Image: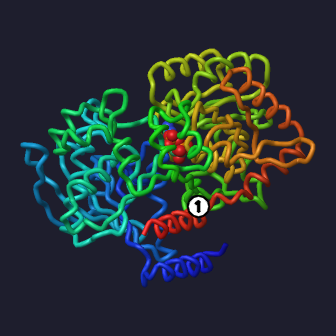
Amino acid sequence: MPPKQMKQELAAIAAEKGRGAMPKILLAAAECAPLAKTGGLADVVGTLPKYFRKLGVDARVMIPYHRIIKDKYGDQVEYLFSFEISLGWRRKFVGVNRLMLDKVCIWLIENEEYFGGPIYMPNREGEQYAYFTRAVLEALPRLGFIPDIIHCNDWHTGMLPLLLKTQYIDSPLAKTKSLITIHNIAYQGLCSFGFVQDYLAVPDGCFGLMERFGQASFLKAGCVMADRVSTVSPSYAREICTPEYGEGLERELSFRGDVCGITNGIDKTVWTPSKDPHIPVPYSRSKLTGKLQCKTALLEELGLELVPSRPLIGIVTRLAEQKGIDLIMGAMDKLLWDNDFAFVLLGNGDARYEDWLRGLQARHPGRVCAWIGYDDALSHRIYAGCDFFLMPSRFEPCGISQLISMAYGTLPIVRETGGLRDTVQPYNRYTGEGTGFSFTRYEPDDMAGAIRYALGTYGDKHAMAKLIKNAMSVDVSCEQWAFEYAKLYLDML
Ligand code: ADP
C-alpha cells in the first residue's frame, strides 16, 4: 500500500475514534541506532520514528545519553535543563538534552554515574535502568510532552508501565497508556525485591506482578502491567506463550491473549546496496555485476584465498548461545573438510565462542576468517560480498540480519524459528520459489544438511540467479511496519 493511502486509512481510523489528530508517542529504550547499538533493538528504535513522521504520527525518542553518544555526537547535542530525582534515599542528577536526527527528536537522559561507561554496566544494569525509567517519567511533564502512549522496549523499560499505573495516577501522565514490545524475552532484568522496593518504591503488594522464579523481573512487570504487549514477529508472538520459549512468562502472556507480532522492517536509507557508502561497488537487483566485485574485495580485505568462484558463507552476530554458535561448533570443521567453500564470521561476545572461532580460523587458513569485534562498516561489506548468510538461531524473535542479507542478494540459511520462519521462504527446487534455505531441528547435522543443499545449489547458475532476484524482491521496507504499529497505537486509544 502506498504511504499516502496508509496515511488516509490511519486518518479514517482516528476519525472513527473521535480523534482529530494522530497519537503522540514516546519511544523509551536503552539503545537507538546509529547513536548506541548492540543489537536489533537499536535498529527498531532508530528506524520506526522516521517512518512515523511520513504517516503523521508524532513520535519522539528518549534514551540514555551514553558515553559513546557523547564522544561521537556531543557537538550536535543541545543541553535543555536538569533536575534531581529520588531513588530511595538517594538524590540523583538528571540532565535532559536533545539531538535532532533525520528530523526526529531524541531526548538524551544524562547522568555520568550510570551512563558514563558501557551501555550495560556489568552487575549494575538494574540500577542503570531503574534510574532511567524514573528519569523518563519525571522528565516528560517538565518537557511539556505528555504522550498518549509510552512505547517501552524490552526489560530496560519494563518497570515503566507498573510505575505509571501505580505511582502516576494523579500526575499529568495519568491518562498516558503504555505498550511494551518484547524484542527478546530471554533478557528479563532480574533483581531482588529489596532492590525494586528500595530504588523504585514499589510496595510489597506489587511483588506478585513481577515475580519470576523467586526474583523480580523488570520484563514481567511490563508484560503484566502494560496496556498492550507486542513482539517482533507473529511466530515469536505464538512461541513466547509456550513453556519452550516463554522463559517463565508464558502463563501471563497467554492469559492476556492479546500479544501481537509485528515483523520488523529494515531501514532502506541505510541498507540498500545501490546506495551503500560502505561497500566498494554499488549494485542492484537489475544490475548485479557489482556484487561479484564486492566479493573479490571482501576476500582480499579478509586475507582469504582469492577464489571468487568458491562460495562464501558469512555471519554477523552477537556470539551468544541464542545465535546457534553451538551448531557451528558441531558441524563447521567437517563441512569445511568435505566441501569447497569459504567462511567469514564477524562477531563478539562469549569468550568460549570467540576462542573456538579463532581456532577454526587457524585450522582452515585461507578459507576461514573469524573477525572478533564489532564493526558496522565491515558488516555492510560482508552482507554485500557473501553468497550465503548463516543464521542457525536457537530462537530468534525477529532477526534483522536475514532481512538485510536478502536485500543484498545474499541468501540466508536459517533455522525455522520465530521471525526467521516468518521472513525466509525455503527454496523449492521444483518450482524455483524461495528466498533462502532452512532447517527445523536444532541439530548440527540438520544445519549441515541445509548448508550442503545451499552449496549444491550454488553450482546451478540459473537457480541462483532466480533465488537472488526473489530475495532482493522481498518487501522488507519500513512503511508497512510503521503502519502496523500506528494501527496498534490507534487501537489502544
Ligand atoms: P540481535 O538483536 O538478537 O543481536 P538481530 O539480527 O535482530 O539480532 O540484529 C543484529 C544487528 O546487529 C544487525 O544489524 C547486525 O548486522 C548487527 N551486528 C551484530 N553483531 C555485529 C558485529 N559484531 N558487528 C557489526 N554489526 C553487528
- How many numbered badges does the structure rendering display? 1
Mark 1 Cα shell of 10 Å, populated few (<14), some (14-19), many (≥20) = some
Q: How was the colour assigned to the protein in this rendering?
A: rainbow
Secondary structure of the residue carrying numbered label 1: loop
Residue 192 appears at what percent x and percent y? 24, 31
Res 327 visible:
yes
| Quarter containing the N terminus | bottom right
Tell me which residue sits at (20%, 38%) in the image: 204
Residue 484 placement: quadrant: bottom right
Percent of width and height locating residue 455: 80, 32
In the rendered image of this protein, does residue 308 appear above or below residue 172?
above
Q: From the viewer's perspective, tell me whether residue 111 is left or right of residue 415.
A: left
Farthest residue to the right: give it. Answer: 430
- Looking at the image, residue 242 sits to the left or right of residue 476; the answer is left
Q: Nearer the viewer, residue 37 or 128?
A: 128
On screen, residue 267 versus residue 285, left or right, reads left
- The residue drawn where x is 59% and y is 30% is 394
Residue receiving disc 1 = 268
Q: Can you say whether 21 is above or below 61 in the image?
A: below
Q: In the figure, residue 166 lies in which quadrant?
A: bottom left
Q: Amino acid at mark 1?
A: Lys
Percent position of residue 287, x then y? 77, 59
